[in-house]
Amino acid sequence: MEVTEKSAEGLDRRFLVKVSAAELDEKLVARLQEIKGQVQLKGFRKGKAPVSFLRKMYGKGVMGEIVQELVTETSQKAFTDRELQPATAPHPHFHSDMDEVIAGKADLEYDVHAEILPVIEPMDVSTLKLTRPVADIPEADIDEALKNIAAQQTAYAARKETEKSKKDDMVSVNYVGRIDGEAFEGGKGEKVDIILGSDTFIPGFEKQLIGAKSGDSVEVKVTFPDDYNAKDLAGKDAVFDVAVLEVKAPEKVEIDDELAKKVGLESLDDLKTRLKERIETDYKELSRGHLKRALLDKLDDAHEFELPNGMVDAEFNQIWSQVEAAERDEEDKDKPEEELKAEYRKIAERRVRLGLVLAEIGKRADVQVPQEDVQREMINMARAYPGQEREVLEFYQKNPAALQQLRAPLFEEKVVDYIVERAEVEDKKISKEKLMEDPEGEEL
């Protein structure tokens, strides 16, 4: 077998692989000898059929398997022997007539082509200087959280039949909606409970039920928002015939030890402590998001190398499919498609560049993802599909590629932790509002 490098331009590599017909025949004979003892042929005792007879019976099928194995083996070996790592799976391009090769009449000859990963020399991460934005937790946040818990524990008592509904009341209704006099799909409901003022229904719907009594019939006129999720209803006027079945008033819930006990805690102080811890965790995650964005920006600025086009194309195609499936925001709405594609390709290039840099830093630092972390993530994914948890777990256990996709973001976070531990990080107090801003949309 001969492997010759045909071309090396940038990250592109192409090798010519030749395997003589004689070498293929040797492999065929060896393989037939292996299976000789396993086959029972009419007229021969088990294991006694001559190889020449086996060649006639199984030669083409076995040779096909040998060629397929050789192509897979040599395609990888062409790169590993030269300490090159393919960025994508190597692609063979055959020169030989494959029917002739399998028939044992011709040499196997083909090109194998792939882009390789670039050689990356990562920066010394200990020289990084980063700012981590932090914010104090306002007492108002804890008070708001307490009010939300109290609201969730609210009970409702029926009003007298003569009492009119007020804001924050719960009304139980039947309704039928019509557009241009015709009922429409999804426009009917029975015994639906609505909290007046919760803004969970179509804008204007709840407001028109304030002042209604049990037993009233109300004609509610609304206009569906232009961005309504059911496109066939967006922007259209509708009339709902609403029958009010019952009106209930909220009973005041005191924020005290009894409220804490309702949610399984011993006291109000215990509940406040738990809420503060939860909010602190949320704030830390937000701080980390900003810090990670700043870190990635610095890594992106510090590294410049040729990127494998195949990896960039794959990343861009994934991004662009998401862009096409979503509704464009105001900023992108009027941009020509080619301009948008150019912008998203730059994003794809950034992601590939940073992915390669983080992978190299993690490799050199021997960053590992503990199996229990992967197992925990698998369980979290399974919980997202109630009733199908076992099937989801089996899917990951049987699909190494899917498991690798699950592991990849965990590895990235471990590498980010590794870098942050070694970088010079200064905490900077900012407002809660600033902390809440999307780190993807700003530069700190």
Image (cartoon, rainbow, N blue to C red):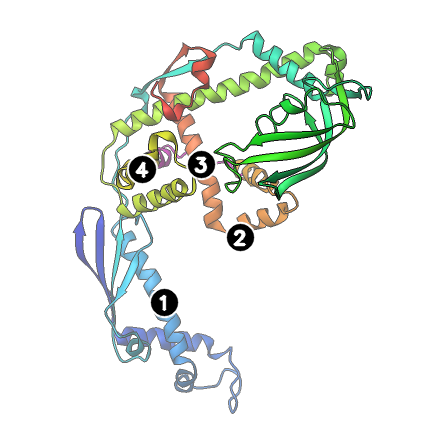
Say which amino acid is labelled 1: Gln
The reply to whether discs 3 and 2 touch (Cβ–Cβ < 8 Å) is no
Q: Which residue is mark 2?
A: 398
Q: Earlier in the sequence, mark 4 or mark 1?
A: 1
Q: Which residues are magenta?
A: 356-371
Q: Which mark is residue 333?
A: none
Nearer to the camera, 304 or 101: 304
Give me the C-alpha separation between circle 4 and circle 1. Answer: 38 Å
Q: Earlier in the sequence, mark 3 or mark 2?
A: 2
Neighbour tally class for label 3: few under 14, some 14-19, many 20 plus, Cα within 10 Å: few
Q: Earlier in the sequence, mark 4 or mark 3?
A: 4
Residue 145 at least partly seen: yes
Nearer to the camera, 81 or 343: 343
Give me the C-alpha separation between circle 3 and circle 1. Answer: 34 Å
Label 1's element?
A: helix
Q: Which residue is mark 3?
A: 409
Q: Which residue is mark 4?
A: 344
